[in-house]
Image (spheres, rainbow, N blue to C red):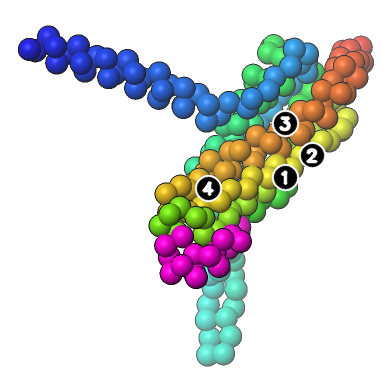
Amino acid sequence: MKTENLKHKLAIILIILPVCLFSQKSEFDLGFSHDVKLVPLNFEISEEAIAAVYYPKKTVFYGQSGDNNVSQTGQVSSYTIDEKTHDTKVLINKYFSEILIDQGSAKFGSIDFNVVYFEQRKKESPFVVFNFITMGIGSLLGVPSYRKTTKVECSICIYDINENLLCCFSGVGVDKYFCGIYYQKNERKSNRDAVKKALKDIDLQISKEIDTLNTRLIASESASICK
């Protein structure tokens, strides 16, 4: 009896484990790649810089207050770093280190990443009238009540070994989805999908210029050595 229970538990684990591993892998799978890469470049990704665009800046004022006025003596700014900003950093790091940039100790320049624009908004779906007329029965049947949209604009700039700007690329990713009682895509996943689309847009642009960029980066490094 104990042997049968053990076999049953092992069978369940063997079924569930591959599913869990696949879902974990697919969360940050960009879904594209290319054979030709950029020569090795330095890069550093700041979560705070991403958070500064994802969320409004929180400014705390401090000073001395009087009867009718406040004398400001300083301010402190902070940003919210949550799962969305962390996921964006992970995706960018994966794109740079695994897809775009070749690995090597000798660096030929640097590459910068920035989130230019971020927005998540909610809008009532066209079916909301139906749900209202049916007094909520439509919602119970699974008719979506509203639609959410995530929009992310990213930019990537490449510099040679002498910190001269070679070029910049920008891409926009938009993810739209309906939400109802029985199904709802969370904002974190929607952000990941939008960032992936923005990166794919940028990657298509870089792929067309990658040979020219490598030539310029190598030439700059060679010229720097000869000085």
- The image quadrant of residue 174 is top right
Residue at horizontal 74 percent and vertical 17 percent from the top:
34
Q: Is residue 215 visible?
A: yes
Residue at horizontal 58 percent and vertical 38 percent from the top:
192
Are the residues flagged by discs 4 and 1 in contact, CB closer than 8 Å? no
Give the residue number, with chain letter if any, for mark 1. 153
Are the residues flagged by discs 2 and 4 in contact, CB closer than 8 Å? no
**SS category of the residue bearing label 2:** strand
Q: Which mark is residue 200?
A: 3
- The image quadrant of residue 137 is bottom left
| Chain-order first, disc 4 or disc 1 | 1
Q: CA distance from mark 4 to mark 3?
A: 20 Å
Give the residue number, with chain letter if any, for mark 4. 187
Q: Is residue 55 visible?
A: no
Q: CA distance from mark 1 to mark 2?
A: 7 Å
- The residue stretch that appears in magenta: 121-138
Give the residue number, with chain letter if any, for mark 2. 170
**SS category of the residue bearing label 1:** strand
Residue at horizontal 29 percent and vertical 18 percent from the top:
13
Q: CA distance from mark 3 to mark 2?
A: 10 Å
Q: CA distance from mark 4 to mark 1?
A: 16 Å
Q: Is 164 placed above or below 82 here?
A: above
| Residue 13 is one of the magenta-drawn residues | no
x then y, percent, for residue 124: 58, 63
Mark in the foreground, 4 or 1: 4
Q: CA distance from mark 2 to mark 4?
A: 23 Å
The kind of residue tagged 3 is Lys
